[in-house]
Amino acid sequence: MDVTLPFWHCECVFRVSEKEFTERYRKRCKRKGYNFSETKALDLYTDSCGHITTLPKNENTKLLITTAVQQLIAAKTTLVAMYGVGEITDAQLMAEIGDVRRYPRRSSLLAFAGVDPAVNQSGKHEAKSNPTTKCGSPHLRKTLYQVVCTYLINFPADEPVYQLLNKKRAEGKPYFVYITAAANKFLRIYYARVKEYIAALDNATSPLN
């Protein structure tokens, strides 16, 4: 994704010739260590020529787009480094979660996913083990289930998510209880890592540094 940052607006592409854009794209790939694809470059050029712009080419739009791309890069970098996530599930997670900064707290993300504990109390009685709310995104829960199943199949003993899953299972918790607990743990780690990555990125690009 970062290879396309210089071409943040379609006018950055079609305002030059196809040959010039292809050469700029090739050089960008080389600097970033990516494999250059002339077919990909031509596809980008063709798409930009047929694109109807809805946002003006100005500094505000540039900031909006480049910030969004940097958020996607941060999320993808974090997900790729997390156990149990593959090419399909990382795209699904990014599509469902979006920019983590729209969740003020980890609990906000957990609530969105519907893997946060529901309040279950009556009078002076308060349950020690509550069901999840399941009020969030069913698509995100499905993807999280796929990720957690990878832990179940491969049992990576050094992974915190699996350690929690295995602990709950050893305690005799029902299947969906320890699966949901693992999904909850996974999202907490993801949230913390992405926020940390973004903070480091913002610090590195700060004018004061």
Image (cartoon, grey):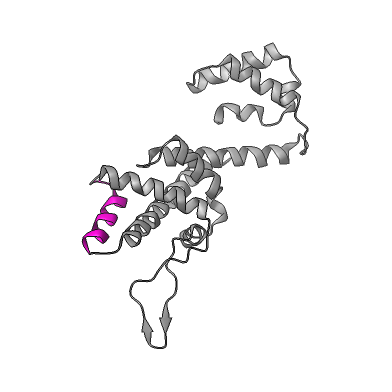
Magenta stretch containing residue 63, yes or no? no
Residue 203 in view:
no
At which x and y percent is residue 124?
A: 38, 88
Vertical order, 116 against 155 (above or below): below
- Looking at the rendering, the stretch of residues picked out in magenta corresponds to 158-171
- Percent position of residue 24, x then y: 63, 17
- Provide residue 162's location: percent of width, then percent of height: 28, 50
Residue at coordinates 42% horizontally, 67% vertically from top-left?
A: 117
**Taking 120 as reference, is 192 above or below it?**
above
Q: Position of residue 185 (x, y in %)?
A: 37, 55
Q: Quadrant of residue 39?
A: top right
In front of the other: 203 or 171: 171
Residue 167 vertical position relative to residue 197 in the rendered view, above or below: below
Residue at point 28%, 44% (across, down): 153
Count of numbered tags: 0
Which quarter of the image is occupied by the N terminus?
top right
Residue at screen point 49% across, 62% down: 111
Residue sitting nearer the eye, 99 or 208:
99
Q: Is residue 165 magenta?
A: yes
